[in-house]
Image (cartoon, helix red, strand yellow):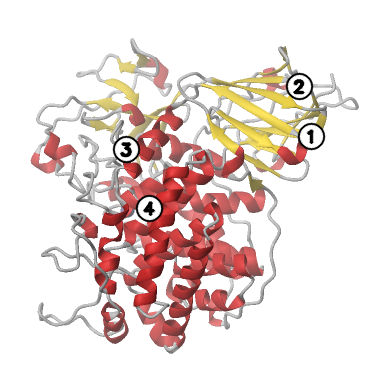
Amino acid sequence: MNDQAESGFLTRRNFATVLAASAAAPAVAARQTAPPNPNPSPQPPPPRRSGPPPEVPPFQAPIEFARKDVPAKVQPFPMTQVKLLPSPFAEAAGWNRGYIECLPADRLLYNFRANAGLPAGSVQPFGGWEAKADGKHATELRGHFTGHFLSASAQLYASAGDREAKAKADEIVAELAKCQQKLGGGYLSAFPTELFDRLDSLSGRPRDPDPNAPQLPWAPFYTIHKIMAGLFDMYTLAGNQDALKVVEGMADWADRWTGSKTEEHMQEILNVEYGGMAEVLYNLAAATNNDRWAKAGDRHTKKRFVNPLASRRDELRPLHVNTHIPQVIAAARRYEISGDMRFHDVADFFFYEVTNARTYVTGGTSNGEAWLGQPRQLAAELKMSVSTAECCCSYNMLKLARHLYGWTADPRYFDYYERALLNHRIGTIQPKTGHTQYYLSLTPGAWKTFNTEDQSFWCCTGTGVEEYSKLNDSIYWHDDDGLYVNLFIASELNWPEKGFRLRQDTQFPDQPRTALTVTVDKPVHLAVRLRIPSWLSSGPTVKVNGKALEATASPGSYLTLTRTWKKGDRVEMELPMQLHIEAMPDDPKVQAILYGPLVLAGDLGADGLTEEMITGPMGLRVQRLPIEVPTFRAASADPASWIKPGDKPLTFRTTGQRKDVTLAPLNSIFDRRYAVYWQVA
Ligand SMILES: [Zn+2]
């Protein structure tokens, strides 16, 4: 046998067994000897920094930018090299594409043209958070969705070669360039600079109790970031050179505006939601080799937020979640282009703390858009609002996970990634319409709500169109030696530099297995590393060309197959799922039930639900439609003793309860009331 299998990360888990098998070290039948996995839940890697935390706040020292790129350990394949095959992921991508197609360019441009004093035509402006400038319900976030739309269109072009999406987005870029010229060549938005005047003059002052007095604007830099990111994506993913010119004009304006403030005043300004301004400026600095943009990005470092994180302290309560995750993504990017370890530590500790201490079983975080409680008090926090787990927060946590994984190649980041992707991303897009959710409520008795076609445009509608236009991203990563298979999604990978193609055939998670088939022009020697998910109860069976390997690897590591690959070589891996329980950290009686990586929800029926309650509302009014949620008595610690397979695949039914309930994956439940967390005695 010329396969060489070895497990990764042997020292990180006390139950890992040495599984090296090579010509020198005969294969060990580790599958029979590996102890059962005691903890099938995702455990994030601990912070890489240890020892006493710094005594002086790390960001007290000046922030000075000097470009020094930190090489990534592993990189994702570009989306142009990975194609989705038919699967629930491809289906979701198709629904999203349909939604993107039905939004006309003129409506996406309406507020920009109106703001620039250009004819906006006779089209009907959008409503919701994109409501028009002169309307009764004008919102100060208008224009944000157009930025997301450009990002989504650029990704559709990269991921699926969608020329129609690119043509519409190219047209929008050209029209935005005209608006920018009319506004002086730098500033570009769907709202006037008056919002920035208010931001400048009112930041740091006590709020005026007079409702007629000028108030702080909603979040002007948040919106500017979305537009800049959309233009940047159109440049990098869709090759639109004009988009680069427009975004550089905006960066010039942002640099001048922020550069005219004292640092103390900028810190006050940063108390108003601004999201990922620094991230797009760092990306622009890296892409254009112009440090000026990075220095402008540095002015968006909110010291009150990053100092505790760089000192490994959780002071996240009661912060607004989704304005802060993008700041951490920016910190990750800042580390990558400078090597400044302070920024590394911010991202590293934040991810660990949020996923370990502030994340629900679905991979979602936040409650009423904020972190309302102390860490590891999630049962208590769950009672504080029904608006749990805002979708754009999961979108951004996945984005952050990609950075951290790129630095380390630690598969535990993908345990989290898979959990959030399967339970909080797939399943929050409405079949056929492609409309998406704001919150994925975990309040027992909740139901899923979705945006309207053109009267919502929440933050999560924006990240939603982005998310489902890049579902082929991050399935496969690589270094110089070989590739990493991180997600079990039917897809094809093309790696022309190595003359290597891989087809993954799987119906995962409907079927607990995957199969990889290699196509090469001539034999290629490289390593294929299979992620062994942490939710497996033991090392899985892996076959190469029909022959079972004698070695396997522990859950939460990689199985590395290093060999000379020939055309038609085939790898099959079984991924058997089991029922398991995850209890709340602060109340062991509050429990969620999982099957492998899938969070199960109990079907509580559809009585009283109407179309108006499902389409349109941002959040739920569970209290207006109370429902009795059953409680359970567990027959034993093993959930399989009282939860039995149902009559359909992936469904189950409780047994022996006062009121038995049918359970199904949360991602499959629509137009029904459900419960994820139960009181279990
Ligand atoms: Zn949101």
Rendered location of residue 661, percent (x, y): 25, 20
User: Against 666, is 106 above or below?
Assistant: below
Quadrant of the image containing the N terminus: top right
User: Which is more N-terminal, label 4 or label 3?
Assistant: 4
Marks 4 and 1, how far apart in space?
Answer: 39 Å
User: Which is more N-terminal, label 1 or label 2?
Assistant: 1
Q: Kindly identify which numbered label has been placed on residue 567.
A: 2
Q: Secondary structure at mark 2?
A: loop
Disc 2 marks which amino acid? Lys
In front: 251, or 533? 251
Please identify the quarter of the rendering in which residue 374 is found: bottom left
Looking at the image, is mark 1 or mark 3 nearer the viewer?
3
Q: Are marks 4 and 1 in contact (CB under 8 Å)?
A: no
Q: Is residue 12 visible?
A: yes
User: Against 228, is 442 above or below?
Assistant: above
Residue denoted by label 1: 526
In front: 565, or 173? 173
Callout 1 environment at 10 Å: few (<14), some (14 to 19), or many (20+)? some
User: Which is more N-terminal, label 3 or label 1?
Assistant: 3
Looking at the image, is mark 2 or mark 1 nearer the viewer?
2
Q: Kindly identify which numbered label has been placed on residue 415.
A: none
Residue denoted by label 3: 434
Residue denoted by label 4: 149
In front: 298, or 252? 252
Using residue 476 as the reference point, say whether residue 243 is left or right of it.
left
Q: Secondary structure at mark 1?
A: strand
Q: Secondary structure at mark 4?
A: helix
Give me the residue at 19% from left, 63% from top: 132
Rendered location of residue 21, percent (x, y): 81, 26
Callout 3 environment at 10 Å: few (<14), some (14 to 19), or many (20+)? many
Disc 1 marks which amino acid? Leu
